[in-house]
Amino acid sequence: MSEFADQLDTRIDDVRHRIHEARSAGDDFLVENLIDDLQNLMELAGRNDVDTGPIAEVIQAETGALPVIPSPDDY
């Protein structure tokens, strides 16, 4: 795995941890913003040819919904 992908995984883990903290605190606004951050990380991964499948699984786990994954032509 590349260093970029490793850093991306670290950022995803951090955001996921912050989502759980925000949920525990009852901060729905922060939860929504952090989920947006996850979606931005997924787009960043897609633009850099990193497999977005694991990020999509995290988003699904956090939201209960499958994200819309843009095609590379959308970048």
Image (spheres, rainbow, N blue to C red):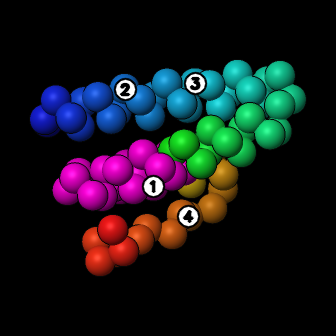
Identify the secondary structure beneath mark 1: helix
Mark 3 highlights which residue? 17
- 40 over 14 or under it: above or below: below
Mark 3 and mark 1 lie on one chain; the one further toward the N terminus is: 3
Mark 1 and mark 4 lie on one chain; the one further toward the N terminus is: 1
Identify the secondary structure beneath mark 3: helix
Task: Provide residue 34's location: percent of width, then percent of height.
Answer: 62, 38
Task: Provide residue 26's location: percent of width, then percent of height.
Answer: 86, 29
**Label 3 – label 1 distance at C-alpha:** 16 Å
Mark 1 highlights which residue? 56
Write down the region rendered in magenta.
Answer: 39-59
**Label 2 – label 1 distance at C-alpha:** 15 Å
Callout 3 environment at 10 Å: few (<14), some (14 to 19), or many (20+)?
few
Mark 2 and mark 1 lie on one chain; the one further toward the N terminus is: 2
Mark 4 highlights which residue? 66
Task: Provide residue 40's location: percent of width, then percent of height.
Answer: 47, 50
Callout 2 environment at 10 Å: few (<14), some (14 to 19), or many (20+)?
few
Please name which of the two marks, 4 or 2, marks the residue nearer to the observer: 2
Horizontal relation, residue 70 to residue 5: left or right = right
Identify the secondary structure beneath mark 4: loop
Callout 4 environment at 10 Å: few (<14), some (14 to 19), or many (20+)?
few
Residue 12: quadrant of the picture: top left
Which one is in front, 6 or 72?
72
Residue 1: quadrant of the picture: top left
